[in-house]
Image (cartoon, helix red, strand yellow):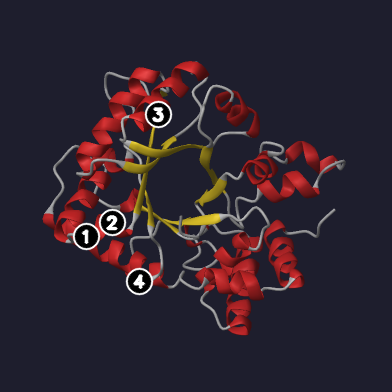
Amino acid sequence: MSELVYGCMGLGGDWDGEEVTVDAVDAAERAVLAALDAGMTTFDHADIYRRGKAERAFGLVLQRHPGLRDRIRIQTKVGITLPTDDVVGHYDLSGEAIRTRARACLERLGVDHVDTLLLHRPDPLMEPQDAADALQELVGEGLVGAVGVSNFSAAQMRSLQRHLDLPLAVNQLELSLHHRGFVEEGICVNTAASTSAPFPEGTLEHCREQGVQVQAWGSLAQGRYSGRLPDDAEGADRRTARLVARLAEELGATREEVVLGWLMKHPARIAPVVGSTDPDRIVACAGARRVAASMSREQWYALLTSARGAGVP
């Protein structure tokens, strides 16, 4: 898997039930080619992205570029049911739903298999054996190459893994300089602040021990530090954006590379998921690994301290 993952959640147009337009496919093609130029060869999907239109648009891009499928890895996710007028939004990791939805993903993508299938979010009603049986059946049929999870804690991963004969390959979690509970959970141990660290304890450590790739969705924090600040941005965000810009100059990098490099310097070997559809911004992420290697410990902690609005405990 590539160290940077391209997130396809923005492809396909609006979140409506309409067909994918030619303009949407053109935009998806530009984004995919920019991601390839930036060295990204893993493309992340989910069956719900743009209500299925992201996968359909990507499949049409693959049709435009014969041979591209052989150069990339495709992963997708199942398990979320979006709300409608008649159905409340909910999670469904029943074996039947996993099988049905995975096959629907293949149809929209126009491929005979995906390299990795992830369970999108924990389902409180999931029976681990039932879910594991469905995953192993899909792998056995050659429809899925590997399996993983998204937004699972270490305990939830262990519960599922007990029933799987194949290892979980990926856990995709929201991680960024802004959404930094994964750091707070570690540095706040045995302090009063530990009660406010929402990240599930020991999850990154478990992934590292088991060889599970950690992928970070929301890794650019919606451009909070590298793009235009939202109108309601607080002082810590503005201060951190200025620090990111200064470090970009010092490191000879883009602001995006600094924000992603901060994540990639973590020893959990985090693979950021880049979700922008702007080709220029996608390419601006390309050197994040180089920045991670050259960023000093002091620079890493300076970014953390700035984003926290306080020093470490």
User: Is 158 located above or below residue 4 in the figure?
Assistant: above
Mark whose residue sits in front, 4 or 2:
2
Distance, label 3 to label 1, CA atoms, is 30 Å
Q: Nearer the viewer, mark 1 or mark 4?
A: 1
The amino acid on which the numbered mark 2 sits, given as a three-letter code, is: Asp
- Residue at the extreme right: 190
Where does label 1 land, which residue? 67
Is disc 2 placed on a helix, strand or loop? Answer: helix
Q: Which type of secondary structure does the marked residue at label 3 adopt?
A: loop
SS for dot 4:
helix
Q: Earlier in the sequence, mark 4 or mark 2?
A: 4
The residues tagged by marks 1 and 2 sit, at their Cα atoms, a distance apart of 6 Å
Check the image and report above or below for 58 versus 46: below
Q: Return the disc, 1 or 4, that comes first in the chain's sequence.
A: 4
Residue holding disc 4: 37
- The answer to which of 168 and 252 lies nearer the viewer is 168
Which residue, given by chain and number where applicable, does mark 2 sit on?
Answer: 70
Do the numbered discs 4 and 3 sit on residues whose CB atoms are within 8 Å? no
State if disc 2 and disc 1 touch (CB < 8 Å): yes
Name which residue lies at 63% across and 77% down: 247
Mark positioned earlier in the residue sequence (4 or 3): 4
* Amino acid bearing label 4: Asp
Q: Residue visible at 16% across and 47% down?
A: 20
Tell me the amino acid under the disc marked 1. Answer: Gly
Determine the CA span between mark 1 and mark 4.
16 Å
Bin the neighbour count of mark 3 within 10 Å (Cα to Cα): few under 14, some 14-19, many 20 and up: many
Q: Residue at x 19, y 44 (%)?
A: 110
In the displayed structure, 44 sits above or below 233; it is above
Query: Residue 18 or 262: which is nearer the viewer?
Result: 262
Residue 295 vs residue 194, the one in the foreground: 295
Residue on which the image places disc 3: 79
